[in-house]
Amino acid sequence: MDSKTPVENLYSIEPALSSSSRRSNFSAHSKSVGRSSIREVSFSDLGPKPVKYGSRGAESETYNMSQKEINDEDARLVQINDPVKTNERFEFAGNSIRTGKYSVLTFLPRNLFEQFHRVAYIYFLVIAVLNQLPQLAVFGRFASILPLAIVLLVTAVKDAYEDYRRHRADKIENNRLASVLVNHEFQQKKWKDIQVGEIIKIHANETIPCDIVLLSTCDPTGVAYVQTINLDGESNLKTRYAKQETLLKIPEKENVSGLIKCEKPNRNIYGFQANMEVDGKRVSLGPSNIILRGCELKNTTWAIGVAVYAGRETKAMLNNSGAPSKRSRLETHMNLEIIFLSLFLTALCTVVSVCAAVWLRRHRDELDYLPFYRRKDFYEEEEDNYNYYGWGLEIVFTFLMSVIVFQIMIPISLYISMELVRVGQAYFMIRDTQMYDEPSDSRFQCRALNINEDLGQIKYVFSDKTGTLTENKMEFQCASVWGVDYNSGKGSSQDQKDGYFVEVDGKILRPKMVVKTDPELLQFARSGKDTKEGSHVHDFFLALAACNTIVPLIVDTPDPTLKLIDYQGESPDEQALVYAAAAYGYMLIERTSGHIVIDIQGERQRFNVLGLHEFDSDRKRMSVILGLPNKSVKVFVKGADTTMFGVTDRSLNTSIIRATEAHLHSYSSIGLRTLVIGMRELSTSEFEEWHSAFEVASNALMGRARLLRKVATNIESNLRILGASGIEDKLQEGVPEAIESLRTAGIKVWVLTGDKQETAISIGYSSKLLTSKMTQIIVNRNSKESCRKSLEDAIIMSKKLTTMSGNTNDTGRTLGASLTPVALIIDGTSLVYILDCELEEMLFELACNCSVVLCCRVAPLQKAGIVALVKKRTSDMTLAIGDGANDVSMIQMADVGVGISGQEGRQAVMASDFAMGQFRFLVTLLLVHGHWNYQRMGYMILYNFYKNAVFVLVLFWYVLFTCFTLSTAINEWSSVLYSVIYTSVPTIVVGILDKDLNRRTLLKYPQLYGAGHREECYNKRLFWITMIDTVWQSAVIFFIPLLAYGGSTIDASSIGDLWTLAVVILVNLHLAMDVICWNWITHAAIWGSIVATVICVIIIDAIPSLVGYWAIFQIARTGLFWLCLLSIIVAALIPRFVVKVLYQFYTPCDVQIAREAEKFQPRSESAAVEVEMNPILNQPRP
Amino acid sequence: MSSYTPSSSAGGVGSADSAAPRRNSKRPKYSKFTQQELPACKPILTPRWVISAFMLVSIVFIPIGVVSLLASRDVVEIIDRYETECVPQNFRNNRVSFIQSDANKTCTRRLTVTKHMKQPIYVYYQLDNFYQNHRRYVKSRSDSQLRDNSSWNDVSSCKPEDDSNGLPIVPCGLIAWSLFNDTYNFSLNNQQLAVNKREISWKSDRDHKFGNDVLPRNFQNGTLKGGKSLDPTVPLSQQEDLIVWMRTAALPTFRKLYGKIERDLQPNEVIHVTLENNYNTYSFNGKKKLVLSTTSWLGGKNDFLGIAYLTIGGLCFFLALSFTVVYLVKPRRLGDPSYLSWNRNPGGH
C-alpha cells in the first residue's frame, strides 16, 4: 500500500464499504458452502447437461428459425454415414487433391496459354509471326523463333518442375491413411478414397484428412483440441466441440444416421454455418464444431467426425492462393522509358522506310535491270516483277522488316532478367543470417517477388505497435482492485521463488510461467473472502481465471512429482491474466465446454460455464456467465476501458470508478496495457431471459454474429467495476535503435496503434520515437468542427516551429530529421471525422510538417485509411508493417507490406509481401537489402536499355549503307544470340551480386538510404545521358571499321564479325567499368561471356553452309582487325569514363564518399558500428 | 531493478524445453556467398589511377598511330578510273546503250608508276555505288548448290536467277549472275605483264565452300546477261573470280582482287592496260576503277586508323595533363566523411 497516493486511498475507503457490503457478504457465504472439494453445481432449470456456447437444447422455436434460414439451393446435404446417398444427387468432390496445375496432356497448351498472358511475350510472338511472312523474312525461320522458344522453354521447364513437385506432394498426401467407418468397423482407407458423408476416426497427433463435423470425442463433454499451424500458422491449441446430441453415439455399435445441411464450400476458415438433423432433432453447427483439413488433433485420444467437405472443396484447399501481386515503382518508371524507347524504335523504322521510299522513287526507272535489284524475272513465261509489290507496299514491308530487325530495342529480355535478378535477390534476403529470428525459428520470407527494389525507396513506414514494436509477450504487472492500486513494482516478496503451486495426490502442479506478485495483494487473496478486501480480490481473480478462453494443458516434466500447467490461448493478454490469477492462488485447472475447474487456494471448485460471449473488436470486451457453486449466476466481463466504463453502473460507487480511472491513467502512462474487469449478479429472470435469447442467437444460421453481439450487449450492462489490470507489453529487442536508424535514414515512421493515447505516447518514448526535444501536437476531438479547429491551430504551430528552424538553417536541407521536431498525436475518434472529407488535406499537410506521427485508438480500416491518405497525396513509397489480423488492410494498402510472424497468428504474414521475425530486421531489410536491390535493379535496367540500343544502332547505321534494305552484316544467329547468350549472364550476375557499399557502412550511415529517395540510381536524366552515350558508342563501333576498311576488299561477314565482337566486348567492358564489387563470380560472368561470344562466333563461322564461312579466321589474321577493336573500345569508353571521373571526383554523391571511406579509412574506426542493436536494458519504469 | 529479471522468466522446466536443440532449425547456413561477403576487389577511380590510365593509353596509342600512318604511307597505289574514258565520245551521253550493244569495248589505259612498287602488286577492280549488300542481292544465292554437286537443283533461294528454260542454273542467283566481266591485260614495255589469277580467293572457300565437282550449268544463257560467263568444264572451286565475287562486299564502294603481279615495278615505268569494258555500271552511275597496289602489314592505303590512333592518344595525353592540373589545383581527400551531404551542412542539430 505504501506506493499509493493519498488520493487513491481516499477513494478506496468509504464507498467501497457501503456499496458492496451486500455482495461481499453473499460471496463470503457462498465460499463457505463450496469449501469442501470439487462439486457439481447445476441449475435446476437447465436439466442435467451443462450448457455451453454454440450448443443448444431441443427448443422448437429455433427449429423453425433455422429452417427458414437455410436455403436448399445454397446448401449441401450430407447424409451421415451414408456416402452413397450423399453423393448420388450431388457430385461432391472426392478427397483426392490436385494442386498440380497441369497433367501430361494439358501441360503444353495450358502452360503456353498462361505464359502468353504477358505482354512481353506477345510482342515476341508478333515479331516472330511477322518474320514468318515470306515478304518480311528477315531472319531464318528457326533463328527468329529461337529467343521466344528459349524463353518459353526455360519458363516451361521451371513450371513443369514445380508442377512435378506438386504432383509428388499430392501423391504422398493422397495416399495417406485414415480410419473410415465401413460396415460398422473402422478400416484404414487412403485419403483420396474418402467421400463426403463418411465417418472418420482420428487419433491423437493425426492430421485431419478433410473438413469434418465432430460427432464425438474421447472427452465426455465432446471437446477436442486441434492445432491449426498448417492452416493459419497459429501454434496454440484451439478447442472444438462435438454436439451433445451425437456425443454418446458409438458408430461401431449403433447405426448413426442423420442429415447435415451446410453451406456451399467457401474459403472462410473462421466461419461455418450448418445444422444437423439427428434423431429427429435439429442442431445448429458453427465454426467450433468443424475441424478443417490440415489441422492436427492434439491432447485428444480420438475424435470421430463426418466428412462434409473433401478434397479441393476443403477450406484449406480453397485458401491455397498465391501472394498478392504488386508492381514496383522502378518498373513503373521503367515502363515510361520503354515507351520512349518504342518511340525511338518507331523513329528509326520511319527513317529507314522513308529513305527506302526515296531511294526506290529515285531509281524507279532502273530497278528492272539494276544488277543488285533486278525487279524483273525474265525466266517466267511473261516477264513479271519478282518479289516487288509496288512502291507503297514496299515501304510498309520495309517498315515492318525494320521493326523485326530492330526488335531488341525494346528490351524484352529485360523482363526475364529482372525476374531472375529478383529471385536471386530474394535468395540472399532469405539466407541473410541477420534476418533470422532465433526464438521463432523463422527466416525472412519473400512472398512477393516483384517489389524487391521498392525496399530501397521507402519514405514512410507505418507500424503497428502491439506485436510489432512490442513483443506481445504480456506480463501482468499491477492491478487495481476495488479502487486500490496494488503495484507489485516495489517490495518484491520473499516466498515466491517458485510461485504458487498446488499439490494433488502428492504431485505438484505449477503454472509454467512465474508471475511476480504483490505481497499485499497476495495476502488479501490468501486471506479468503471473509474480509471485504478479500472478497473483492476473490471476485477479481475469479474473473481473471474464468473470463477467458484459455485452455489449461498439463505438461509432464522429467520430475515425476512435478507437473506444469501450460495455458494455451489465442490472446496473450488472457494468458498473462490467467497466469497472474494462478500466481495469486486462482489456478485454472480444467476447462471443458460446460464447466471450468479452478483451484482456489488449494481447493478445487467447479463452475458451470453457462454462456460465453467472445471478444469482438466492436464491443472490445468479452463476458462469461458462471454458475457459481452457491447456485448464484454471475456475469464477469473484461474489456477495454473505453467500452467498459460505458456499461458500468455509474450510480454505484462512483469514487471507486474514479479511482480506477486514475489508476488506469497512470498504468497506461507507463506503457501498460489495461483491462477493466466488471461483474454483475444475475437474477433468475434475467438469466432466463438471456438464456433464451442466447439460444436463439447461437442457433441462427444467418446473422448469428450480429445476434450474439446484441445478446451480449444486453447482458453486459450495469456492471460493477471490480478493478483493472495492468499488463506490460515488452518492447522488442532493438526497436529504439531500429527506429532511430530509420529516422536518420530519412524515413518517416508513423505508429498506428489501437492503444490508448497515454500508452501509445509512453511506448513512443521508450521506443525513442518521441524525444523530449519534440513538440507534441495532440489532436483528439469529438466533432468535425473542433477537429478542423485544432488542425488549423496545429498547422500554424507546426509551421511556426519549422520556419523558426528554417531561419537558423537556411541552407535548404531536405532531411526531415533535422527540423525542429514536431510530433503529431492523433486519436481514432478524430480520424473518424478527418478521414474521407476535406479535412484529410489539412491532416496531410500537418503530418508532413511533423517528423513523427502517432495514431492511437485506430481501427483496422482506419489504419488502411491513413496509409491511403499518404499514398494518394505523395509519390513516396509507403511500407506498412504489422503482425495481426487488424493490420491486414494496412499491409495490403501500402506499397510494401511487411508481416511480422509473431504471436498474433499469421493473417498478417499471409497478406504481406515480406515477412520476418522481428521489427529490427526492418533496418537490415531497408537500409542494406533495400539499398542494394534498388541500386542493382536501377543500374541493371539502364544497362539493359543501353546494351540493346547500342546493338540496334549499330544495325541501324549499317542499314543506311545498304540502300535501306535491312541487310545486316552481323550474322543473323549473332543477332539472335546477342541478348540470349552474349550479354545476358553478366547483367543478371551483376544485378544479383554487385554491392556498392558493404553492410557495415550502410548501417553506420543510415543517411545513405537517401540515395533511393533521391532516385539516384534510376532517373530520367540518367536515362537520357545513357542514351546519348549509347549513340556515341554505337557510332564509334560502326564508323571506325567503316572508315578503316572503307574502299577495301572487306566482305560483309568479316566486318560483321568485327562489329559483333566489338559490340559484345564493349558492352561487357562498359559493365566492367561500372561494376563496383568484383568477386570471382563477376569475373567469371563478364570475361566468360566475352569468351563465350568468341566461341559462338567461331562456331557459327565454321559452318560451311553459312555465308560467313571462315570469315572470323580470315579477318582475325590481320592486324587491322585488332587495331580496330582496340581503338573502338578505348574511343567508345572515353567520354563515359571522363564524365564518370569528373562526377565522382568533384560532385561525389554520398555513396561514392562512403565507398572511398570504406576503402581508405582505417578499419578500426568503422568496427565500432557492429554494436548496432543491443536490447535496451533500462526500462522506463520508476 | 534486478528483482525484475526473474519474474518474467519461464519456469525451470519450461526454459529447458525451449533450450532443447531443434531438430531442424531453419537458421540459414552461414557462408560467405549467402551473406554476400565473398572476397571482392573494389576498385576506386583515384586520381593517380585515372591519370596513369590516360597516360598508358596515350603511350600505347601514339606509337601505334605513328606506325600505322607510316605503314599506310608506304603503300603505293595506282588508281585509274576508266568507266567514262572507256566509252567512246559519241556514246558518252548514252552509256547504257553502248554497254548493252555489241560494239567493241576494248580500251587502252596508260598507268605511270610513281614510286617503287614491291611485289606482289595486287590488281583490284573497284566498283562504286554497287550495293552488293542489298538485301535482295545477298539473299539470292544457294550455298548448298555451290558446295555439293548432288544438290545442284537446290535453287529455291535464287530467284530471279533460279532456272532458265526450266533447268536449274549453276551457280544460281543474282550474285553469280552479275559476275564482274571486265578484263585487264597489262603490258610493260611491250611485254606482257603476267597477272597471277590463282589463289586470289580464300583458301577456305576453295576447299570447302565451292565444290570441286560442281560444274557450271545453264549459266548466263538467259535473255539478259548480267556479267561474265563461266567455263562449264571448270569446277566452281577453280573459278576464283566467281569465288571472290561471291564474297559479297560489306559496303557499296568496294574492291575485289583481280590478280597479282609478281614483280617489282620501278618509278616512271608505264604500264599499258588493255581492258575490255564489259560490265554495266552505267545504269546506276557506278564508277569503275582499276587499282594497282602494294600492301603493308596493315593492308592497303588508309590513313584513317593511324590518324584515329594519334587523335585518341593525343586526347588521352591531354586528358592526363588536364586531370593532373585539375587535381593539383583542386584536390579532394578521398573518403573524407566531411564531404557527406549531411556533414556538409551542419546546423539544425
Image (cartoon, coloured by chain):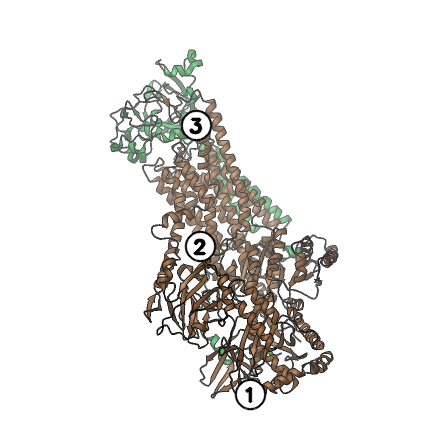
Chain colours: A brown, B green
Rate crowding at label 1 as few (under 14), some (14 to 19) or many (20 or more) other CA atoms within 10 Å. Answer: some
Q: Position of residue A422 (x, y in %)?
A: 48, 54
Q: Determine whether the residue tagged by mark 2 lies in a helix, strand or loop.
A: helix
User: How far apart, in angstroms, are the residues tagged by discs 1 and 3?
Assistant: 117 Å
Q: Determine whether the residue tagged by mark 3 lies in a helix, strand or loop.
A: loop
The number of discs equals 3
Q: Position of residue A42 (x, y in %)?
A: 52, 80
Which amino acid type corresponds to the residue marked 3 in the rendered image?
Thr
Image quadrant where residue A904 sits: bottom right
Which residue was labeled with disc 1? Answer: A35
Foreground of the two, A197 or A1155? A197
Which mark is drawn over residue A1081? 2
Q: Nearer the viewer, mark 3 or mark 2?
A: 2
User: How far apart, in angstroms, are the residues tagged by discs 1 and 2?
Assistant: 77 Å
Q: Identify the image quadrant of the N terminus of chain B.
A: bottom right
Q: Are discs 3 and 2 located on one and the same chain?
A: no
Q: Identify the image quadrant of the C terminus of chain B.
A: bottom right
Q: Are marks 1 and 3 in contact (CB under 8 Å)?
A: no
Foreground of the two, A972 or A772? A772
Residue shown at 51%/36% (left/top)? A346
User: How far apart, in angstroms, are the residues tagged by discs 3 and 2?
Assistant: 45 Å
Which amino acid type corresponds to the residue marked 1 in the rendered image?
Arg
Indicate which disc, 1 or 2, sits on the residue closer to the N terminus.
Answer: 1
Which residue was labeled with disc 3? Answer: B253
Rate crowding at label 3 as few (under 14), some (14 to 19) or many (20 or more) other CA atoms within 10 Å. Answer: many
Which mark is drawn over residue A974? none
Give above or below for A794 relative to A1136. Answer: below
Q: Are discs 1 and 2 located on one and the same chain?
A: yes
Foreground of the two, A963 or B201? A963
Q: Determine whether the residue tagged by mark 1 lies in a helix, strand or loop.
A: loop
Whether residue A534 is visible to the viewer of this picture, yes or no, is: no
